[in-house]
């Protein structure tokens, strides 16, 4: 009787947490799946089956959005992984200004994404922006960073990397600092230089941190919307449209059921691409 009471009592303690999880996470998710099969407004709804999914998947600009989403996610993720690692190694050295530099690298992350997007839109203005004025001073021709369809998406990616590389750096620093110092001392006794330390110790033993950066950056890139919308709104033309911006345009036009179906499709794309990557990285990490 006493053991049954303890078991019931322990389950009873889970109820508040389960209610919060159900209300804030599970219920909205189930509601999104349901409304993706409906035509709805804020006052009425009508079941339409798979019509929203068919309409969304036949959207003329979806091919561009899907391609841009993949380019955005892979490029931003790659740059954050590489730059974050280099900065993590540098800021793990015994430097007098190490803490100050760590704060400076992380500072952009705490800024509002919308504010950063608007600021860089001004800085990247083709004639009045400070970036092109700086290029003109040193004798170089400035670029139309956000107006040229060939480079506009990559301009947005660079701003995203500038803001987000601080988080990657912090994760790398935590991983590098967890490596026992005795390993480095032993390698130095054997004649290993700084490059050898990075190649044979830091790089392989910081693999768990690197895997975290890859997963987080890749998923973040697939879902990115705020920078795209504040800096280009998908333009010029459709050159910087991603799946998330296409969904928002449909929502803004009043096609709520269609945009909800788009969100479900984006959720499935993120899950389909991220889960195998997570399993692959986890398997490689286990082989260390």
Image: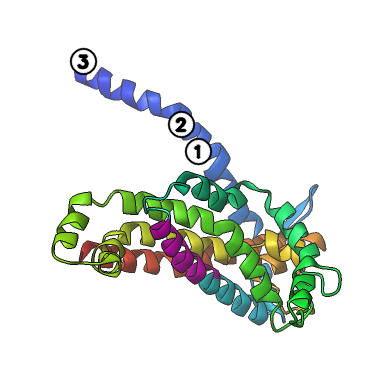
CB contact under 8 Å: marks 1 and 2: yes
The residues tagged by marks 1 and 2 sit, at their Cα atoms, a distance apart of 6 Å
Secondary structure beneath disc 3?
helix
Disc 2 packing (10 Å; few <14; some 14–19; many ≥20)? few
Membership of 82 in magenta stretch: yes
Q: Is the magenta region chiefly helix, strand or loop? A: helix
> In the image, which residues are magenta?
76-90
Q: Nearer the viewer, mark 3 or mark 2?
A: 2
Name the residue: 76% across, 79% down: 142
Residue under pointer 3:
2
The residues tagged by marks 3 and 2 sit, at their Cα atoms, a distance apart of 25 Å
Secondary structure beneath disc 2?
helix
Res. 204 image quadrant: bottom left
Name the residue: 45% across, 48% down: 98
Residue 34, can we see it? yes
Residue 176, compared with residue 214, is above or below; it is above
Residue 75, given in percent of the width and then of the height, sits at: 54, 74
Residue 50, can we see it? no
Name the residue: 39% across, 68% down: 277
Residue 40, given in percent of the width and then of the height, sits at: 75, 56
Q: Nearer the viewer, mark 1 or mark 3?
A: 1
Q: Quarter of the image containing the N terminus?
A: top left
Residue sitting at the far right: 128
Residue under pointer 1:
21
The residues tagged by marks 1 and 3 sit, at their Cα atoms, a distance apart of 30 Å
Residue 17: mark in rendering: 2
Q: Nearer the viewer, residue 215 or 7?
A: 215
Membership of 176 in magenta stretch: no
Q: Nearer the viewer, residue 248 or 148?
A: 148
Residue 243, given in percent of the width and then of the height, sits at: 65, 70
């Amino acid at each position: 009787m006493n053991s049954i009471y303890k078991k019931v009592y322990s389950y009873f303690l889970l109820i508040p947490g389960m209610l919060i999880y159900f209300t804030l996470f599970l219920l909205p998710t189930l509601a999104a799946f349901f409304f993706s099969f409906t035509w709805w407004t804020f006052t009425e709804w009508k079941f339409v089956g798979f019509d929203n999914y068919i309409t969304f998947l036949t959207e003329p600009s979806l091919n561009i959005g899907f391609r841009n989403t993949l380019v955005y996610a892979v490029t931003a993720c790659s740059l954050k992984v590489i730059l974050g690692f280099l900065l993590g190694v540098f800021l793990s050295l015994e430097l007098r200004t190490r803490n100050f530099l760590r704060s400076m690298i992380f500072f952009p992350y705490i800024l509002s994404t919308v504010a950063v997007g608007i600021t860089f839109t001004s800085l990247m203005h083709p004639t009045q922006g400070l970036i092109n004025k700086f290029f003109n001073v040193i004798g170089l021709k400035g670029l139309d960073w956000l107006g040229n369809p060939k480079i506009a998406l990559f301009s947005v990616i660079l701003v995203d990397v500038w803001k987000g590389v601080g988080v990657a750096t912090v994760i790398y620093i935590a991983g590098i600092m967890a490596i026992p110092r005795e390993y480095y001392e032993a390698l130095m006794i054997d004649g290993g230089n700084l490059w050898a330390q990075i190649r044979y110790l830091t790089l392989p033993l910081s693999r768990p941190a690197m895997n975290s950066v890859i997963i987080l950056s890749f998923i973040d890139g697939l879902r990115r919307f705020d920078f795209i919308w504040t800096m280009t709104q998908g333009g010029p033309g459709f050159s910087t449209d991603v799946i998330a911006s296409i969904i928002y345009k449909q929502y803004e036009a009043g096609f709520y059921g269609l945009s909800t179906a788009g969100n479900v499709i984006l959720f499935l794309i993120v899950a389909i691409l991220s889960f195998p990557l997570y399993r692959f990285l986890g398997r490689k990490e286990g082989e260390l």
